[in-house]
Image (spheres, grey):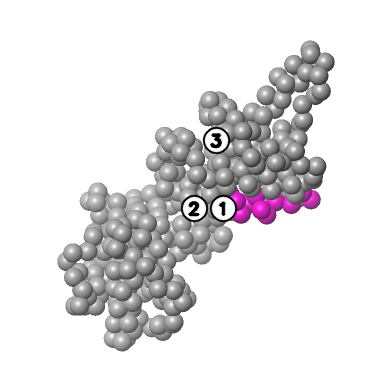
């Protein structure tokens, strides 16, 4: 689950904090980086567990409605949502349950939030369309939760506030983690039952190694990389750069110099996008031009053994 996009973002955050806090202990900072990444995986599992928690909440409401129907002799309420096939499969998922048990993560202390989430869902058009539909199969049940996640959970201020209270890391992570939750929902297959695999914490050992190497190269070669910036910025007002811009470019240069298999265009595009989100409104365009100039200068002087491939996109 922890991919290079997320790693780049975390390295930017942790490098900026490393300098701002005056912390010169690189080993401690590296541990903080890896811990921060692990918290993103905690959030991934916690958000999947939210689906299960809301489903259990719906069963409490169903029990009340069933009791009322028996007393009044009216038609029994539908169990379609409370016993949604996808939600049951997720509830029984071995990987999820083992992780939640190990980490002691659950939604038991958030009854008011679960109640509010349940009502948000049952008041939604997505829910009403599902309950009124004659389709009754696993694919429809799974698609319901994909739609609920996209329309109600993904952009939810109350959930964001709750997550921020629980972990300082989670508020920054949620936007990226949401995409992995949606990908996981889409990948579920009924035939896998409780053995359906969730996304692993790291796709490979290479990604974990990439995180360490990128962070260490950024910090240990800071003076050298900032000199490259100065050399390539003769036609740029380098002194007026936001400090975050300098950090982002320093990390981008570290990636260019440390990972020969990553094309220059990929590095530039990825860090330009990060700059748009984490720095000033003008940073994306400025950093795009600066990194392009720096890469060409390093290639020309023989310090970077890569080619400048054509880039399909010119970031704003």
**Residue 314, image x, y percentages:** 40, 73
**Residue 189, image x, y percentages:** 74, 52
Image side of residue 195 versus residue 205, left or right: right
Q: Secondary structure at mark 1?
A: helix
Image side of residue 70 versus residue 116, left or right: right
Which residue is the site of mark 2?
176
Quarter of the picture containing the C terminus is bottom left
| Residue located at (64% from left, 33% from top) | 122
Examine the rendered structure and indicate whether residue 188 appears above or below residue 94: below
Residue extent of the magenta highlight = 181-191
Quarter of the picture containing the N terminus is bottom right
Q: In the image, is residue 183 part of the stretch drawn in magenta?
A: yes
Q: Are marks 2 and 1 in contact (CB under 8 Å)?
A: yes
- Number of residues whose C-alpha sits closer than 10 Å to that of mark 3, classed few (under 14), some (14–19) or many (20 or more): some
| Residue located at (23% from left, 60% from top) | 242
Is any atom of residue 229 visible in this view? yes
Label 3 vs label 1: CA separation?
Answer: 19 Å
Q: Of circles 2 and 3, which is in front? A: 2
Label 2 vs label 1: CA separation?
Answer: 7 Å
Residue closest to the eye, 254 or 252: 252
Q: Residue furthest left?
A: 239
Which residue is the site of mark 1?
180
Which numbered disc flags the more N-terminal residue, 2 or 3?
3
Residue 105: which numbered mark, if any?
A: 3
Which numbered disc flags the more N-terminal residue, 3 or 1?
3
Q: Main secondary structure of the magenta part?
A: helix
Residue closest to the eye, 313 or 91: 313
Q: Secondary structure at mark 2?
A: helix
Label 2 vs label 3: CA separation?
Answer: 20 Å
Residue 1: which numbered mark, if any?
A: none
- Number of residues whose C-alpha sits closer than 10 Å to that of mark 2, classed few (under 14), some (14–19) or many (20 or more): some
């Amino acid at each position: 689950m922890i991919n290079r996009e997320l790693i780049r973002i975390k390295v930017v955050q942790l490098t900026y904090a490393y300098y701002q806090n005056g912390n010169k202990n690189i080993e401690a900072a590296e541990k903080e980086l890896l811990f921060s990444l692990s918290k993103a995986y905690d959030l991934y599992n916690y958000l999947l567990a939210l689906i299960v928690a809301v489903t259990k909440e719906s069963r409490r409401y169903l029990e009340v409605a069933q009791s009322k129907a028996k007393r009044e002799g009216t038609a029994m309420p539908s169990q379609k949502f409370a016993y949604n096939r996808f939600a049951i499969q997720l509830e029984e998922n071995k990987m999820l349950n083992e992780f939640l048990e190990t980490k002691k993560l659950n939604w038991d202390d958030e009854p008011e939030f679960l109640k509010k989430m349940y009502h948000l869902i049952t008041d939604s058009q997505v829910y009403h369309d599902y309950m009124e539909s004659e389709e009754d199969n696993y694919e429809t049940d799974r698609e319901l939760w994909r739609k609920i996640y996209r329309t109600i959970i993904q952009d939810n201020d109350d959930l964001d506030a709750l997550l921020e209270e629980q972990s300082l890391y989670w508020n920054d992570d949620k936007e990226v983690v949401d995409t992995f939750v949606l990908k996981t929902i889409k990948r579920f297959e009924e035939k896998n039952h409780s053995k359906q695999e969730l996304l692993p914490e790291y796709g490979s050992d290479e990604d974990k190694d990439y995180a360490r190497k990128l962070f260490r190269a950024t910090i240990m070669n800071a003076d050298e990389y900032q000199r490259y910036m100065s050399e390539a910025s003769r036609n740029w007002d380098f002194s007026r750069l936001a400090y975050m811009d300098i950090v982002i470019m320093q990390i981008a240069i570290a990636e260019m110099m440390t990972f020969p298999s990553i094309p220059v265009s990929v590095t530039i595009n990825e860090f330009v996008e990060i700059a748009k989100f984490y720095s000033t409104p003008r940073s994306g365009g400025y950093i795009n031009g600066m990194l392009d100039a720096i890469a060409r200068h390093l290639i020309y002087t023989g310090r970077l053994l890569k080619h400048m491939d054509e880039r399909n996109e010119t970031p704003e």
